[in-house]
Image (cartoon, rainbow, N blue to C red):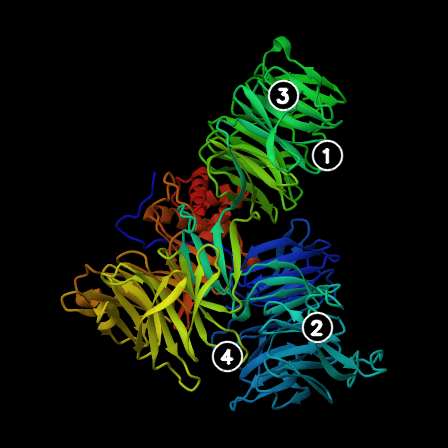
Amino acid sequence: MVLEIGQEGCQYNYVVSAHKPTSVQHSAVGHFTAASDLNLVISKSTQLEVHRLTAEGLQGVLDVPLYGRVAALQLFRPASEPRDLLLLLTERNKFCVLGFDEESGELVTRANGDASDRVGRQVELGQRGIVDPQCRLIGLHLYDGLFKVIPMDERGGLQEAFNMRLDELKVVDIAFLDGCAAPTIAVLYEDTKEQRHVKTYEVSLREKELVEGPWQQSNLDAGASMLIPVPASGGAMVVGESVVTFIAPGVVRSAAIKPTLAYGQVDDDGSRFLLSDFLGNLYLLLLLREEGAAGASSSSGAGAGAVAGLKLEPLGRTPAASTIAYLDSGVVFVGSSFGDSQLIRLHSSPPDPSQPTSFVEVLDSQPNLGPIVDFAVVDLERQGQGQVVTCSGTGVDGSLRIVRNGIGVVEQALVELPGIKDLWSLRKTFMDAHDTYLVLTFSGETRVLGMNAEDELDEAEIPGFNSTALTLCCANTVHDQLLQVTATAFRLVDCMTQQLVTQWEPGADGRITIAAASPTQLVAAVGGRTLVYLELGDGQIEEKGRVQLDADIACLDITPVGELSEASEVVAVGSWALEAHIFALPSLAPLFREKLPTDVIPRSTLFAQFEGDTYLMYGLGDGQLVNYRLDADGPTDRKKIALGTKPISLRTFRSRGAAAVFAASDRPTVIYSSNRKLLYSNLNENEVSHMTSFNTAAFPDSLALGKQEALLIGTIDEIQKLHVRTVPLGEQPRRIAHQETSRTFAVTCTQATISGEGGDSVRLVDEQTFELLDRLQLQQHELACSLCSTQLGDDPATYYVVGTAFAPPNEPEPTKGRIFVLAAAGGKLCVVCEKETRGAVYSLAEFQGRLLAGINSRVQMYKWLEQGEGGRALVPECSHAGHVLALYLATRGDLVVVGDLMKSIQLLAWGEEEGALELRARDFHPNWMSAVTVLDDDTYMGAENSYNLFTVRRNADAATDEERSRLETVGRYHLGEFVNRFQPGSLVMRLPDSELSQIPTVLFGTINGVIGVVASLPHAQYQLLESLQEAMRKVVKGVGGFDHAQWRAFSNQHMPATPARQFVDGDLIEQFLDLKRDSAEAVIAAMAGGGATVESVTQLVEELSRLH
């Protein structure tokens, strides 16, 4: 049944992340998962990741969502704890202390609480959460003039918190000093004259107040922004815009630096630190010790006065860092919010001779889409599959990212061969690294393709094979033999002579219907119901046992898993009685039998191992997959998921060293595992009926795919749900638009310089290769603010329209700007028309053949008229004033929705007769808008600067003018992400047979690199999901004991927290698919209204998960 939106319109919405946040803000290094593990803990806004450092690099341990935005994160170890604990503080002043349980592999909440006070002004420059180096207390700075202290015992237990008065109101940074007898904080602050100073205080727990500390320093560098405590010195470094200063009792040392964003400590004794500036240059800061003092064993470690000077050494370039974590032996994690995050190794000499000034070797790179300033949704392949092209990164790390759903296949060879029934790859000998032959079987014949001397795929022959029969199974076996199974015989062929060595025939027992092999074993169904087990020796096939089943055998598998690579201890069977069986080998004793949850025959079965866990999978005839996790007690945790609608055939393969399973059907799917969770990713090919891996010297890591009419050989992209391609620009992209007619993109860019003097430009790039075709340079201090591609009036041509603003440094607000109409032809940009405006052109939109522009506080409409000899010009037609700043425009029919800087959403209507834009309705809440879009004729959605989404609806049929002029807020939701842009569209192909093919979706992009989907649902489905969400909250507990309902509650500076309504959280709902069976049943039992079953809810949630 295809779902459609009813009379209520798009009021009920489902919000889900298609791409999780990737921008890294905080990191910490310590021994968190075990005393012997070195861990890296990083936060990406609302995601927490824990990694373990291994010889191969970073290995993921945990990746969990948080019900809060991380404001601070620190590892600490109380005296009697064997390993570190983690302090987390969120931007809504919730905090928790987390530990790790090695047995379950999960986070344990040791303590949590809400540090909010009833009164107080929230700090402007970000909350701080810090732990005393001796773990005596936690300090929180959340409100101006207050320092909150939570005392801690040696087990890490927290006692009652209390506030201490802090005289400094505008605190820039705050840190605990190391090497002081009593807990001591250093406070970097700004006074009323905008001068910056640093002061120290001792925290007296008995008096519950701050006592003046050992040192202070006035009138620091005007841009002083960061405190770095130096271990065991009782002092700290203050990082300014142009100078870094070490201050300790009686010591002040300085060195010149560039404006710095992040630091990381290298040595435990604090003699070396890493600094990164905002162009991404990495420096090593050395604290030079006085001779003799380095080994001094005074009570303050290195001893006061031991630091003789500071020395700065450049190391090379990385993306601009927001956090730096030194791991071990020169390996450093550089976390970035502005570009990709990197794992690097520092060398004492340049690793690459071509870059003599760089001591940095990049070991691994984690792509980051943030900040997504703008994006376009396009269908470049013209297959109905949307792709998102984002403007990502800042400064020199700016890039375009092309994001698409599913795994792409890079075609290397395509052979027209209709009617392939199955295919296998064979190696020349058992130990060969590469495959040589591809065996294809058809009804009534078997053909062999092989790699010839020129490394081309050619017809080949294996004389020992029966080529006039359908092959059921083919494999390399030990003793360098090839196995072929047909309906009448098992044939062993010598690899060297390629002649038949021996064969085994079932004789009068009947025909062989199904067979499966391992390198030393063979199982087959003879005469339909008899399971025969044979062992393969050197030139011999020996029967070891047989067992009669009470139904015909439909599928078999004996893939060896675990330590065993040549022999399996069990055989999996699927029968026509719709049952799953496991028998032991060689005894054929039954170990397991269960009715499969289906009324369709299983067509394929497979043992697979991912990340140390073994699974048994059954592919059914209707495109559904059933999988079990195998543990010591046998199969458990059964799950069923719909992959396609046609029979599934399962095969294992390896991609970039990791195990994966290919499920061939009408919607081929790759099954893989991440953080011990099975994930399913669509292949961007349809109708693949059979597959085998084909790893040859000419086609390394390739797959051979049997389609209805052809054989396709190709490689696949890295296995992940979304595929991201990067086009580095070296400057920051701000706006992007796509033009179908010229097959190009226009991108406006801002150059990155420390002085900020660079001018903006408009780039024209090719839609496929993204190479630069042409560039239009703007004037000095002229910023490109808006961009669109549109047709105007009765002119058949399509134009790019760019809106700019002149922003000289001395003007508080732009007073003039320009609108360019550009034609892109033959790879060149040509200015067709240029129009001066009285203000910044913040937004542009096409409107009924006219051009709408948001210029400062006005919405201006232009007509496109012919002038003179074939020339055309923009002529003002009408305007509407009364906004603060008209930043965002969205249009539908004759309506214009305006997103204002401060005055939320306003609705204008165009009257053709009057020739005027009139205000029809407005939202009276003071929301500071960041994006706006139209969901349907009467419902509009906005995002505002406190990370919320909301929907408003107009009452066109209301009785009074007063009600008609009001946009009523119908939906509210705290997203926890700053949205920069909405665009209608979808990342996935909508299949016409899908229930949700008619559901409207809107995509959004955020500062932290999230690409999200908002899908409008019919009321009945929404109600079911709302009760599912309520039940999930009871069963799935948030990390750190944080509450989901409080997290999603709408709040901003004008409005206290109000519960979310008419939005449901898809990220929580889709966790239902990962629940164990008993937890899933508990959720269904907790749902209000009844009538739902685990199966019906699973089916709905699976359909929803296909929206992204």
Q: Which numbered circle lies on residue 564?
A: 1
Amino acid of disc 4:
Gly
Mark 2–mark 1 distance (CA, rounded to whole Å): 49 Å
Q: Earlier in the sequence, mark 2 or mark 3?
A: 2
- In x, y percent, where is residue 539? 75, 20
Q: Give left or right: position of 1072 versus 522.
A: left
Q: Give left or right: position of 168 versus 806.
A: right
Local crowd size for mark 2, using a 10 Å CA cut-off: few (<14), some (14–19), many (≥20): many
- In x, y percent, where is residue 51? 65, 57
Q: Earlier in the sequence, mark 1 or mark 4?
A: 1
Amino acid of disc 2:
Pro
- The residue singled out by tag 3 in the image is 485
Q: Earlier in the sequence, mark 2 or mark 4?
A: 2
Mark 3–mark 4 distance (CA, rounded to whole Å): 72 Å
Q: Residue furthest left?
A: 913
Q: Give left or right: position of 785 versus 79.
A: left
- The residue singled out by tag 4 in the image is 756
- The residue singled out by tag 2 in the image is 133
Mark 2 vs mark 4: give the one in front: 4
